[in-house]
Image (tube, helix red, strand yellow):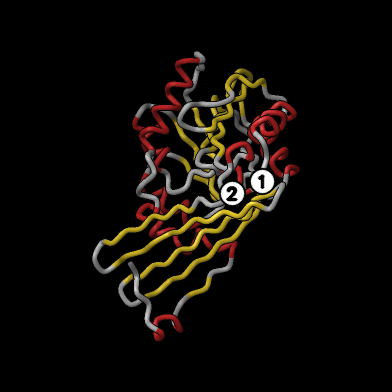
Amino acid sequence: MIIITFKELMLMTFIMKSKWYDKIAPYYDKLTHKKNYENDVALIKQIIKEYELNVKKILDIGCGTGTHAKILTEEGFIVTGIDKSRKIIEQAVKKVPKSRFIAKDMLKINLNEEFDLVICMYGTIHYLNSKRKIRKAFKKFRKHLRKGGAVIIELGLIKDNFNPDKTDMSSFDSGEVEGSMIREYEDRGNEVLFSYNVNIKDHDKIIRAVDTRKAPLLSFGAWKELLKEAGFKLIMENNKKKSILIGLK
């Protein structure tokens, strides 16, 4: 647990929403150490095998610091990662120099290139705050797929099983550097307000970062319809461990 003195409080850096990921980038892997990236890749490979998808080139939307890309590259795939935060992308380049990473908003990607598979994991799609933007993103995903290519989208916030009382917390302590991240959610009817509250103590530097966003709170059926509207053929609706959408171009 981090104890912050009044003097330290006065030195805190309050971070604008748009710079939130940039500021926590050096600590991102430590803050998210509970994520099981290996299981995610195992699931992706299972889907590829089960649906007999011919996959070599993968576009990873919301790639973060590149951990999925690292494992997928080691498995023999060619990965291009996209993330809005330039500082996060810098971390990914260091971690996976054999992969290509681009700092870009998912709504603005235009690579003039087709991929066999597009993945959007860990509820990244919920960073879009309207159905209009979700539709635009799905069309972007489809545009970057070859005919017969597939998209895998992991959903984290679904109206059917949403628990507004759920609070997630992760923390780390590596000696002179320690930190914590708390995720909280609020049901606002047809939308959800979610916030990430990060506290970092790095030697004498204190960083407090709060990022609050809103997103449509949609049923699983509504997500399916949005994917179909974008021109995808839905080939998988759900999974026992994760809420997954899989569409085929």
The residue under the point 67% across, 33% down is: 223
**Where the N terminus falls, by quadrant?**
bottom left
Report the residue at 50% width, 50% height from top.
166
The image shows residue 187, relative to residue 20, as above or below, that is: above
Lateral position of residue 168 relative to residue 112, left or right: left
Closer-to-camera residue (141/98): 141
Query: Which residue is at the far bottom?
Result: 7
Badges 2 and 1: C-beta atoms under 8 Å apart?
yes
- Viewer-nearest residue: 35 or 103: 35
Residue 160 image position (x, y, % from top left): 62, 36
- Give x and y (percent) for residue 201: 35, 70
As helix, strand or loop, the secondary structure at mark 2 comes to loop
Q: Amino acid at mark 2?
A: Lys
Residue tagged 2: 104
Q: Judge the density around disc 2: few (<14), some (14-19), many (≥20) Cα neighbours within 10 Å.
A: some
Mark number displayed over residue 108? 1
Q: Position of residue 227 (x, y in %)?
A: 68, 30
Residue at horizontal 50%, vertical 41%?
A: 122
**SS at mark 1?**
loop
Q: On the image, which quarter does residue 178 sit in? A: bottom left
Quarter of the figure with residue 186: bottom right
Alpha carbon separation for disc pair 2 and 1: 7 Å
Which quadrant would the C terminus be assigned to in this image?
top right
156 versus 31 height, above or below: above
